[in-house]
Image: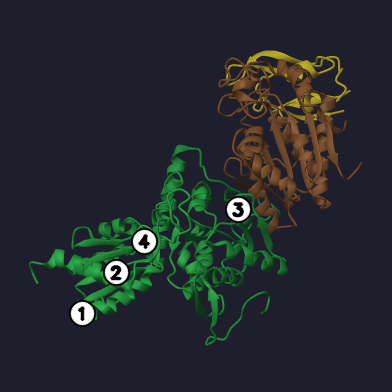
């Protein structure tokens, strides 16, 4: 059981996190940011996140600001 | 639940990176910040920043910084350390700054065994100016100034900095790491920590060459760029610790 | 000797070479770090300080180049200590980029230039060809460096003290512009005590962000409006420097018809030439800018408005000559007596040149 917090003001939509998450819980959203890029969102309806923090460790922009487990 | 990841305290409040999407500079600086936090160095550190994509370090980190002209970060850092031997001094440069225009300063700083820590981002190109051939550009790599690819006749060969620095007697630690995967990022952080520790122990020069992606100028997606680091780049620039007089 | 300081009573003088005088004065001034690279005719400064700084536990690096040396100074002074480098003309050329940065960064860099001839390698003949390089600079952008030119070994000491003080007082680079003649010359001189108060650098010096926000010293403001303001502020600062620190000396100008003007060690010869000319019935005076930047424009203009003509005597092709002309602004005549390098213009040569100028300019009225 874990969770993450995404700061979409920091996110530049490189999507490294979507590839990294072992449970594929981070998805490209259909909402766009101020640059017109599709933002990412944490979508974990079944509580699958294990709080491994791999997404945060690979995020080049520290847009994943918190990881809990 | 317990918080297992947070933004390192060595960052400025509300900082925002100005790098391109997917650029590994962001990861490298975060690792430096985490190590500064863990070793409790933030308040006694002075950094000398260089020119290139690395120039705006002072916008991100909550450490004192003095800007040096292009290639002169290690000379400036030498001045800082000689004036303030009790402070922790580090530089953070690109390959253009460290291995091309600043090669003399880099090598001599290592030869003198200055008790400072230096990080060099190796992304095989001049990023800020838009992707020109640099000292680390690989054979065959196409850049805006090597449109047919790097060849021996016109451009010669890329430099292997971690090996060169390791050959200097004043060097206490020299390693090459990469930021393409979680295991490599973990290794990178260990090396960055070691490079600071040899300074703290007064053993000599600490150096880490960091293989990093430049998706924009490589014309690749971030994932393709990391694939290149794992493949071609790691063959030319093998990862590993080239010198460590401290031992483990 | 006490803490490395050469302490002397006010009346005591020792015979000392200019380069050694500058080096010991730097020690007395509290210079904590010296970084340098050998070049004739200033090498004695680095040689002397290599031993002295180590004895005192201060910073010393045999830098790999002049580029590295001046950047080491920038790093050191950014932490609030006094530091300097020394070099000579063609190698000072290598430092121009750093001077531009240091001026924009507002770093109190002290650079001693013991001039030799140029352009290019120029060999080791003494010359004054770095007036333009020092005053107008070879670096990019709009910046100004304080330039002080000593004329004898005593002034090498006094103005080394002054260079360290002004650099920190105004957070501006300072060049002590000596020449090969002064560097290699021995004269009696007195070190006295460093006469200036210590400048408080605590508001800007880098010391680690403990109990305060991090500080950054950098040269570019990025945003257009800020960059414009930054450059304007640097120039406003220099106006204050000009107001407070412009210095010159003059002899016999009040009744003079013609004023010999020189800087640095050529001052010695125009003083002697003035006496000879006076004996010959020519009402000559002497004017000598001590600070070449800020330049004593106002005083030269005043004198020119009194109808006094100027003869600029210098060991270059007429570099300060242009600044004197600019200050005179057509109010009176300005002539040049010069040689590009080598043996200093002798008193006899200056006198005969002045007489020729007088003949040419005043033939009708004599």
Q: Chain of mark 4?
A: C
Figure chain in green? C
Q: Colour of chain A?
A: yellow
Please tell me whether mark 2 or mark 4 is closer to you in this view.
2
- Give the residue pinned by disc 2: C349
Q: How far across and down, in percent of the image, does residue A46 sit?
A: 86, 14
Q: Residues within 10 Å of mark 3 (few under 14, many from 20)?
A: many
- Give the residue pinned by disc 1: C280
- Give the residue pinned by disc 4: C315
Q: Colour of chain B?
A: brown
Q: Are marks 1 and 3 in contact (CB under 8 Å)?
A: no
Direction from residue C164 to residue C257 in the image, left or right: left
Direction from residue C147 to residue C274 in the image, left or right: left
Alpha carbon separation for disc pair 2 and 4 = 13 Å
Residue C340 occupies quadrant: bottom left
Alpha carbon separation for disc pair 2 and 3 = 40 Å
Please tell me whether mark 1 or mark 2 is closer to you in this view.
2
Helix, strand or loop at mark 3: helix
- Give the residue pinned by disc 3: C69
Helix, strand or loop at mark 1: loop
Rendered position, C217 above or below C251:
above
User: Which circle marks residue C348 in the picture?
Assistant: none
Q: How far across and down, in percent of the image, does residue B234 sit?
A: 78, 23
Alpha carbon separation for disc pair 3 and 4 = 28 Å
Residue nearest the viewer, comparing B81 with B143 = B143
Rendered position, A15 above or below C53:
above
Alpha carbon separation for disc pair 1 and 2 = 15 Å
């Amino acid at each position: 059981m874990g969770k993450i917090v995404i700061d979409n003001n920091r996110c530049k939509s490189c999507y490294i996190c979507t590839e990294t998450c072992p449970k594929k819980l981070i998805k490209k959203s259909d909402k766009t940011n101020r640059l017109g890029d599709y933002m990412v969102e944490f979508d974990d309806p079944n509580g699958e996140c294990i709080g491994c923090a791999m997404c945060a460790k690979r995020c080049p922009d520290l847009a994943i600001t918190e990881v809990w487990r | 639940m317990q918080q297992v990841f947070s933004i390192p305290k060595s960052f400025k409040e509300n900082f925002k990176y100005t790098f391109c999407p997917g650029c590994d500079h962001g990861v490298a600086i975060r690792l430096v910040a985490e190590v500064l936090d863990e070793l409790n160095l933030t308040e006694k550190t002075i950094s000398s920043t260089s020119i290139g994509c690395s120039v705006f370090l002072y916008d991100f980190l909550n450490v004192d910084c003095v800007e040096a002209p292009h290639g002169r970060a290690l000379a400036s850092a030498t001045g800082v350390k000689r004036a303030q031997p009790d402070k922790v001094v580090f530089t953070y440069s690109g390959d253009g700054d460290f291995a091309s225009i600043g090669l003399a300063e880099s090598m001599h700083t290592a030869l003198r065994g200055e008790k400072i820590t230096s990080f060099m981002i190796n992304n095989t190109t001049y990023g800020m100016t838009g992707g020109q051939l640099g000292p680390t550009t690989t054979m065959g790599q196409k850049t805006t100034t090597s449109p047919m690819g790097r060849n021996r006749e016109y451009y010669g060969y890329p430099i292997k900095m971690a090996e060169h620095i390791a050959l200097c007697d004043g060097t206490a630690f020299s390693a090459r790491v990469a930021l393409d995967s979680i295991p490599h990022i973990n290794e990178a952080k260990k090396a960055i920590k070691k490079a600071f520790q040899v300074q703290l122990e007064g053993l000599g020069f600490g150096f880490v060459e960091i293989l990093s992606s430049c998706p924009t100028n490589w014309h690749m997606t971030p994932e393709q760029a990391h694939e290149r680091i794992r493949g071609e780049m790691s063959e030319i620039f093998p990862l590993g610790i080239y010198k460590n007089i401290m031992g483990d | 000797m006490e803490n490395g300081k050469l302490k002397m009573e006010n009346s005591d003088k020792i015979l000392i070479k200019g380069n050694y005088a500058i080096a010991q004065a730097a020690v007395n001034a509290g210079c904590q770090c010296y970084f340098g690279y050998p070049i004739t005719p200033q090498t004695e400064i680095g040689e002397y300080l290599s031993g002295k700084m180590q004895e005192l536990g201060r910073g010393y690096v045999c830098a790999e180049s002049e580029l590295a040396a001046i950047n080491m100074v920038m790093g050191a002074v950014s932490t609030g200590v006094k530091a300097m480098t020394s070099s000579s003309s063609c190698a000072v050329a290598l430092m121009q980029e750093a001077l531009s940065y240091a001026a924009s960064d507002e770093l109190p860099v002290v650079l001693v230039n013991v001039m030799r001839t140029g352009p290019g390698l120029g060999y080791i003949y003494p010359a004054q060809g770095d007036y333009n390089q020092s005053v107008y600079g070879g670096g990019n952008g709009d910046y100004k460096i304080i330039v002080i030119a000593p004329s004898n070994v005593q002034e090498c000491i006094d103005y080394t003290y002054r260079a360290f003080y002004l650099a920190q007082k105004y957070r501006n680079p300072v060049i002590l512009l000596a020449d090969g003649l002064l560097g290699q010359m021995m004269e009696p001189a007195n070190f006295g005590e460093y006469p200036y108060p210590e400048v408080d650098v605590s508001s800007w010096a880098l010391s680690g962000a403990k109990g305060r926000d991090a500080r950054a010293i950098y040269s570019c403001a990025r945003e257009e409006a800020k960059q414009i303001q930054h450059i304007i502020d640097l120039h406003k600062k220099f106006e204050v420097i000009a107001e407070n620190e412009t210095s010159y000396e003059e002899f016999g100008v009040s009744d003079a018809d013609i004023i010999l003007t020189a800087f640095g060690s050529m001052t010695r010869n125009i003083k002697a030439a003035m006496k000879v000319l006076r004996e010959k019935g020519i009402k000559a005076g002497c004017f000598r800018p001590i600070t070449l930047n800020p330049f004593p424009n106002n005083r030269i203009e005043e004198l020119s408005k009194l109808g006094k003509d100027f003869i600029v005597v210098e060991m270059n092709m007429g570099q300060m000559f242009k600044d004197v002309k600019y200050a005179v602004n057509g109010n009176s005549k300005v002539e040049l007596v010069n040689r590009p390098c080598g043996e200093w213009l002798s008193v006899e040569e200056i006198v005969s040149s002045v007489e020729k100028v007088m003949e040419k300019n005043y033939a009708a009225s004599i």
